[in-house]
Image (cartoon, grey):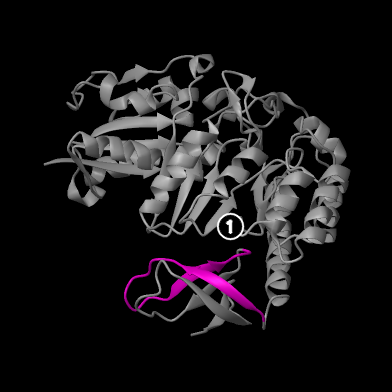
Amino acid sequence: MKKVSFHTLGCKLNFAETATISRLFGQKGFVTVSLDQRPHVFVLNSCSVTENADRKCAKVVKHALKMAPSAFVIVIGCYAQLQPEAIAQIPGVDAVLGSNEKFKLLDLLTDFDKKEGNETATIQVAPIQESRTFSPAYSLSDRTRAFLKVQDGCNYKCTFCTIPLARGSSRSAPIAEVVAQARAIAVKGIKEIVLTGVNLGDFGLIDNKRTAHFLELIQALEAVEGIERFRISSIEPNLLNKAIITFVAQSKCFMPHFHIPLQSGSDKILKLMHRRYNTQLYQDRIETIAKEIPTCCIGVDVIVGFPGETEEDFLTTYHFLNSLPIAYLHVFPYSERAQTKAATMAASVPFAERARRAHMLRTLSEKKLRYFYSQHLGQQARVLFEQAEAEEPVEGFTENYIRVQLPYQQGLSGKVCPVILQTIHTEGVVIPKLLS
């Protein structure tokens, strides 16, 4: 029996791609196993959004070889595209495949014989400009929800970001293909699909030509039978127009939940980042959502410690975020990335100061989330419960992304059930009452 094991770093898009590659291995007779079952092949899907993700690549390889010393180690993903030579020097790595090659892995690697002695790792990484085709992918999470890739790459040139260098230009699947995949997922009994991409709102580019818009995609998906819930994973504020917000407000399937990157609440810093909006546009989007969808959960990405960010700039960001009706923050201390313009900028912020600012915003996020949850106590909601181990608490999410938890009950997993939201638990979840 041929065995393969996978490990994924980074975003939900990476997880969707790993799952698809796993299915390709299955078609070749491989069984996906855990590392303690000593697989013949180990595939690491890497990330390069932060310096920590780069370091983790070597750490994961070392751990994999400790568990399965004879495994043929393949590294794919964003870090593989950006730094193939560095990865090839990691002890035990046998092959490095770039963004254009990862879905052709089983065609490009004709055998999985472990490298011996001083043999060098195989590197197959084409220039990122050659990554022009869209490779569909999806992953299933405990047979409850699926993460469906509908877009890849990015045409934006944010000064802190390596993603365009790692994934290439913006490109998408045709709407008909996305709808067909959604229908195939529905047949598997999945209740929720999360739409994922690098720059999701830029959906519709094929061969660098505009063939559709994101609004047309979600309108088509609304008609897919069998999927009770769709979520939009993340969308740039300049691409989140009023028509999309109005559609979600009126939709029966698209959940009242947006995740909208901000990165900074200082217009000065936004210009240095080369973001395509200012704080006024961002505030307008948030206020439009709050007006049209009062129960909507809004999440925000924010970077602290970007080069040139003074204490005044940071406090401007803090107060701006505090003033908005948002529910939670994903906070990232700025991380220098090679090959980006920001890495050469002056006025670097000390690491300790980045950590302090990140802590302040994470504390603000906790307060925001608790306030958002408190506004919904006593109200009825519908929860999609996730898979749970026997005797372990079962968790799930409401339509507007409130996380709930109940003592284990058999038969809840994968079901959408009505509840009354009762109390806020210290772990950042709401304890509900299950309605019959």
Q: Quadrant of residue 21?
A: top left
Residue 235 higher or lower than 341, as above or below:
below
Question: What count of labels does the image hold?
Answer: 1
Q: Is residue 118 left or right of residue 434?
A: left
The magenta segment: 379-400
Q: Is residue 272 left or right of residue 83?
A: right
Residue at x 73% of width, y 75% of height: 375
Residue type at the position of mark 1: Cys
Judged from the image, the secondary structure of the residue bearing numbered disc 1 is loop
Please provide percent x and percent y for residue 429.
57, 73
Q: In this rendering, does residue 374 appear at all?
A: yes
Say which of 205 and 155 sits in front: 205
Indicate the quadrant containing the N terminus: top left, top right, bottom left or bottom right: top left
Residue at x 18% of width, y 50% of height: 37
Q: Is residue 170 left or right of residue 84?
A: right
Residue at x 37% of width, y 69% of height: 388
Q: In this rendering, does residue 299 appear at all?
A: no
Residue 371 higher or lower than 359, as above or below:
below
Say which of 224 and 190 sits in front: 224
Residue 372 higher or lower than 156, as above or below:
below
Please provide percent x and percent y for residue 309.
80, 40
Please provide percent x and percent y for residue 396.
50, 68
Please provide percent x and percent y for residue 337.
61, 30
